[in-house]
Image (cartoon, rainbow, N blue to C red):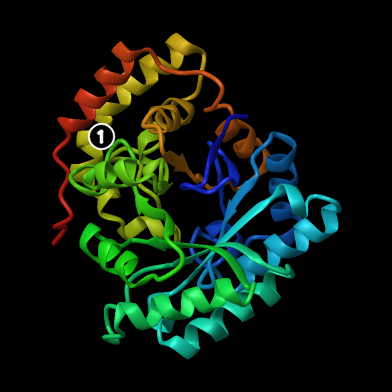
């Protein structure tokens, strides 16, 4: 496994992380057993993946509980694992931030949360950003968290949040980023690269859309959250399956890799980008980890870049 500094800190995180949304069991088409979560985390640690990202809203704390319990039961690994979690935008008042962070710490069963992220801005409650950031700095001062991050913040709000901080800085920004959805490149990614802030890429496989598993005739069903995701609507899947999928599959054959590994490798070639794919089982962790330790050629990188830019994706689905 390869490692990279988290922002400008000395904390090393794996180039491929582990997203823990699926552990919540409330979004991916059915319940998720703790035993499977423990196997997934154990395999990730075995393969050198030391960065685990969860959130308070994943199963209303269930994912955090699973992550914390597994780390405790696996024994002796806490010092080797970087735990990131998130506070939803509904809880960004000063007192709520403090309360939420402490509850997350209790569910995780740790002395300190390595990275606490603001899951999305306080869009509906009009909480001033500086009020929220004062609470985040208080958490650092109190030893509840080590570092501050944001998630799903546009550039302008990220800059505003940074301007509120007195003694600390934001070390990471978690945003949707994959070969299909690349809006982050328009202004945010260049800023993050210039400022030395890590981009944590959520949905790095576009929830599986980049792998070629789905087509207009084979869409997610049965309560899966992807049923109503715009990327999985027929017109968008037609764009993906006719333009992008053939190139990814061709490169997978050329490099002896899977389509998912090709897509993840393309992301980590951007320098400061750390993808956090989820995994429903240990085999998927092995596949995800296999995206590191090698690189696409510059020619193949540019080829993927060009074909992905040619996609016409719409979010207007009715």
Residue 243, x across and y down, in percent: 22, 26
Q: The N terminus is located in which quarter?
A: top right
Taking the spot 31% from the left edge, 27% from the top edge, the residue there is: 245
Taking the spot 73% from the left edge, 61% from the top edge, the residue there is: 34
Left or right: 305 with respect to 149?
Answer: left
- Residue 263 is at least partly visible in this image: yes
Residue 107 figure quarter: bottom right
Residue 67 figure quarter: bottom right
Query: Where 258 falls versus 166 (above or below)?
Result: above
- Residue 60 is at least partly visible in this image: no
Taking the spot 35% from the left edge, 22% from the top edge, the residue there is: 248
Residue 194, x across and y down, in percent: 30, 42
Taking the spot 41% from the left edge, 60% from the top edge, the residue there is: 225
Tag 1 residue: 240
Q: Secondary structure at mark 1?
A: helix
Q: The C terminus is located in which quarter?
A: bottom left
Left or right: 121 with respect to 141?
Answer: left
């Amino acid at each position: 496994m390869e490692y990279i500094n988290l922002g400008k800190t000395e904390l090393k995180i794996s180039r491929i992380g582990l997203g823990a949304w699926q552990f919540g069991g409330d979004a991916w088409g059915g319940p998720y057993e703790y035993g499977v979560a423990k196997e997934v985390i154990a395999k990730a640690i075995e393969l050198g993946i030391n960065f685990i990202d969860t959130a308070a809203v994943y199963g209303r704390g269930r994912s955090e509980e699973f992550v914390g319990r597994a780390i405790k039961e696996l024994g002796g690994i806490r010092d080797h694992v970087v735990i990131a979690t998130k506070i939803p935008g509904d809880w960004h008042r000063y007192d709520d931030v403090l309360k939420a962070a402490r509850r997350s710490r209790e569910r995780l069963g740790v002395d300190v949360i390595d990275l606490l992220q603001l899951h999305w801005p306080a869009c509906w409650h009009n909480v001033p950003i500086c009020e929220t950031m004062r609470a985040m700095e208080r958490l650092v001062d109190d030893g509840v968290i080590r570092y501050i991050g944001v998630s799903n913040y546009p550039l302008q709000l990220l800059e505003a949040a940074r301007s509120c901080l007195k003694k600390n800085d934001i070390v990471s920004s978690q945003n949707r980023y994959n070969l299909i959805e690349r809006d982050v490149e328009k202004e945010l990614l260049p800023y993050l690269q210039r400022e030395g802030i890590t981009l944590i890429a959520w949905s790095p496989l576009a929830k599986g859309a980049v792998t070629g598993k789905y087509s207009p005739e084979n869409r997610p069903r049965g309560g899966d959250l992807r049923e109503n995701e715009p990327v999985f609507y027929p017109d968008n899947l037609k764009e993906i399956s006719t333009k992008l999928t053939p190139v990814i599959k061709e490169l997978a054959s050329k490099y002896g890799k899977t389509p998912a590994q090709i897509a993840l490798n393309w992301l980590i070639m951007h320098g400061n980008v750390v993808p956090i794919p989820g995994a429903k089982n240990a085999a998927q962790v092995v596949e995800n980890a296999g995206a590191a330790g090698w690189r696409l050629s510059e020619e193949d990188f540019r080829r993927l870049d060009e074909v992905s830019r040619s996609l016409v994706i719409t979010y207007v689905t009715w």
